[in-house]
Image: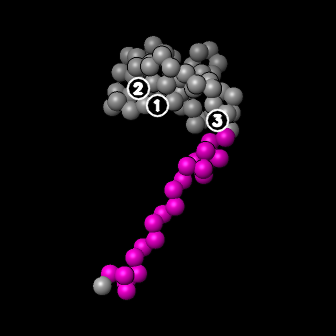
Amino acid sequence: MNWPATMDALEDEGYGYTGTSKTCECGTTILWFVTPNKKWMPLSSIKDSRLVPHHSVCDRIKQFRKAGKKPKPEAPKQKDLF
């Protein structure tokens, strides 16, 4: 599928609009879709009713990713193994 897509093109590809939306802290409205693999996908509208993945238009995405990032667990040391 080519992005940006229209609502009709997404539905033809098996995506379903959930009917829910939310305003992101960046000020853009997020429309929630379900992919053909049953995963939730946030999309945002741009010119001419085209839809793109929200992360491509969100100017705060780096802040969200840093905030949600979990620290990697430390590898066990040799003495911890015995």
Q: Earlier in the sequence, mark 2 or mark 1?
A: 2
Q: Earlier in the sequence, mark 1 or mark 3?
A: 1
Identify the residue position indicated by label 2 in the image.
34
The spot of residue 66 in percent (x, y) is: 60, 52
**Placement of 54 over or under 73, stated as above or below:** above
The spot of residue 65 in percent (x, y) is: 58, 48
- Res. 51 visible in picture: no
Rendered residue at 33%/31% (across/down): 37
> Is there CB contact under 8 Å for labels 3 and 2?
no
Q: How is the image coloured?
A: one colour
Identify the residue position indicated by label 3 in the image.
58
Rendered residue at 59%/35% (across/down): 56
Amino acid at dot 1? Met
- Does residue 75 appear to the left or right of 4 in the view shown? left
The spot of residue 71 in percent (x, y) is: 52, 61
Identify the residue position indicated by label 1 in the image.
41
Nearer the observer, 5 or 76: 76
> Is there CB contact under 8 Å for labels 2 and 1?
yes
In the structure shown, which secondary structural element does the residue marked by tag 1 occupy?
A: strand
Q: Which residues are magenta?
A: 60-81
**Placement of 61 over or under 39, stated as above or below:** below
Magenta residue check for 69? yes
Amino acid at dot 2? Val
Q: Earlier in the sequence, mark 3 or mark 2?
A: 2
- Does residue 24 appear to the left or right of 14 in the view shown? right
